Amino acid sequence: MARRRRVRQRAVTRPVSVLSIDEGRTVETEADRARNDLLDLVESQKTGRILTGTLQGVERTANSKTSSMAVIYHGAFKVIIPAEEAVVPPEDTRGRSMDETLNYMLTKRLGAEVDYIVKGIDQQSGLAVGSRLDAMAAKRREYYFGTDRDGNQRIYSGVCAEARVVSVIRAGIFVDLFGLETYIPLRELSYQRWMDAGLYFQAGQRVLVKVLEVERSGRDNVRVVASVKQAGENPYEKALRMYSVDSCYVGTVSMVDVNGVFVALDGGIDCLCSYPKRGRPPRGARVTVRILGINHESNRIWGAITHIAAAR
């Protein structure tokens, strides 16, 4: 019996032989993937290579309710990033402790695509420790203070670039623009009047932005002003030609504020209307609008609500 057990044990531990179709095997086994994942982490630790992953969890240190950690999975390895190495602490914590603030910031970034550099690996436990801030600093040095082959700056005022949405609040979004987290307010997200950025964006998205301003100071400090809406064509310039004064069109109420009722029309534009006598319609209501005026120079259109569709 003992001999049979030894035979079975050797059979289980024997390396799997794979017969390939071509001269070189292209399909990876689980062992291949695990080895490549480990090599990625080792290379990052030794050379500073930047890795990218999705922030999939926020954990607290064992027996502690203060220290928070971001969790990223690289294959079978669990990469943890301490909060102080994952987000830049704000100057004003608004009465919260710094630990609570960092935990909140990490939680708001769940699902975001982030860069990191590995600082340590424990192969036995399958754990690695990383730093997002180090990866961001390396990218800033490359893209904001480095130059291309012709000696030109890579990011400058007027350039359009791809950015990652890392956090969304009602009033705007935070994007990672090549190692720099930049806040883009609601008014710079769309030419239409929006009330909640969370209805249109989520962490993990990639968006096209236009860089409006770049301020560099020192060897690593940089400030950027960016816009999502200005990265695309202004819909008003084209859409306003679709409408005529004294004509009626249907639309959807996009926002109601002290200025009046904004109605979204086809073409991606908003028509500002006064409050109707029968009462202001709720956001999302289907209405009919009579156009009272169009200003092609200021890209403004205004009108009056003549009919509000009954709720279904």
Image: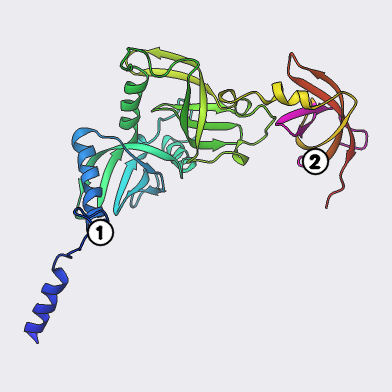
Image quadrant in which the N terminus is located:
bottom left
Q: Name the one closer to the observer, 72 or 33.
A: 33
Q: Name the one closer to the observer, 124 or 64.
A: 124
Looking at this view, name the residue that lies furthest to the front. 22
**Residue 233 appears left or right of 244:** left
Residue 2 x %, y %: 7, 84
Residue 258 x %, y %: 79, 27
Q: Mark 2 points at which residue?
A: 282
**Residue 9 appears left or right of 92:** left
- Do we see residue 95 in this rendering? no
Q: Distance between the residues labelled 2 and 1?
A: 57 Å
User: Of the residues shown, which amino acid type is indicated by label 1?
Assistant: Thr
- Do we see residue 204 in this rendering? yes
> Which corner quadrant of the image does residue 217 belong to?
top left
Vertical comparison of 284 with 180: above or below? below
Residue span colored magenta: 260-286
At 82% from the left edge and 24% from the top edge, which residue is drawn? 302
Q: Residues within 10 Å of mark 2 (few under 14, many from 20)?
A: some
Residue 160 x %, y %: 49, 23
- Residue 265 painted magenta: yes
At 20% from the left edge and 49% from the top edge, which residue is drawn? 122
Q: Mark 1 points at which residue?
A: 29
Q: Name the one closer to the observer, 80 or 303.
A: 303
Vertical comparison of 26 with 15: above or below? above
SS at mark 1 in the image:
loop
Q: Do the residues labelled 2 and 1 touch (CB within 8 Å)?
A: no
At 33% from the left edge and 41% from the top edge, which residue is drawn? 81
Looking at this view, name the residue that lies furthest to the left. 3
Nearer to us of marks 2 and 1 is 1
